[in-house]
Amino acid sequence: MQNEHNTFSSIKHHISFHLEQIIEEAEKMRLSIGEKEYCLLCELAQIRDRFNEIQSTASFFYLKAYIAEFTSQYIEIAKAIKNLSERRHGALIVVERQQNVDHLIQEGIQLNATLSNRLIESIFYPGNPLHDGAVLIKGDYMISAANVLPLSSQNFGQEKVGTRHRAAIGLSELTDALILIVSEETGKMSFALEGTLYPISTPDSNLQ
């Protein structure tokens, strides 16, 4: 419990530090905006990237808060998506919370196996016939794999949204489930909740 408190204090310090830097950079922008050679768009892009980095780091800690009540094996899930991300193995993982999702998904292959990072990683290994669908987690068990989720009908404009991400958002629009995604193309991690997609960053120290 003490370690958890220390970790959360560390992330708050991290966010506070970077927000202070952004404030300093914004003030420099304000003072330099009249200079002829000043590239405002470049500076704004850098600040946007800094905000995105902060959001990604914070999302990991809030991810735990969202699922810890519903599975005691959340660290196994975090390890799995981190390892899958490093290998660029695409993944789609549904963590059921209060609302049942059975009626909303096209069921794949029954597993009824104890949740573990190794099993998750093996399912999403390229070439495994189960890797294209979603894994369904209820409590501390992996109920099924190769499940098909409803796709979101949101208009994402010019933003490129892959099938896994669209499926994750689609299910999250209909239930309170949290759906984790690892992009096969980029290795980037994210989760969908209540119709919104959140990027995740998981430094090694967060998984101890």
Image: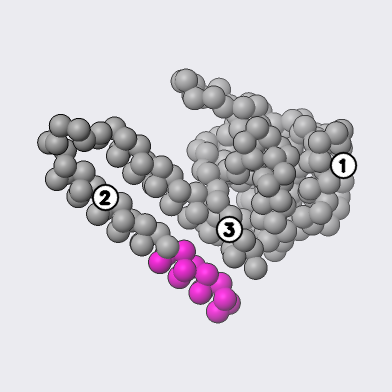
Mark yes or no: residue 112 visible.
yes
The residue singled out by tag 1 in the image is 110
N-term mark: 3 or 1: 1
Say the numbered circle drawn on residue 89: none
What percent of the width, then of the height, locates residue 23? 26, 53
State which mark lies toward you, 2 or 1: 2
Label 3: element kind: loop
Instruction: Tell me which secondary structure the magenta stretch mostly adopts.
Output: helix
- Circle 3 packing at 10 Å, graded few (<14), some (14-19), many (20+), is few
Q: Amino acid at mark 3?
A: Pro
- Of residues 104 and 36, the one nearer the viewer is 36
- Circle 1 packing at 10 Å, graded few (<14), some (14-19), many (20+), is some
Q: Which residues are magenta?
A: 1-13
Q: Amino acid at mark 2?
A: Glu
- Of residues 66 and 56, the one nearer the viewer is 56
Name the residue at 21% across, 35% down.
Answer: 38
The residue singled out by tag 2 in the image is 25
Quick check: 23 above or below 130?
below
- Of residues 144 and 175, the one nearer the viewer is 144
Q: Is the C terminus in the top left, top right, bottom left or bottom right quadrant?
A: bottom right
N-term mark: 2 or 1: 2
State which mark lies toward you, 3 or 1: 3
Mark yes or no: residue 94 visible.
no
State which mark lies toward you, 3 or 2: 2
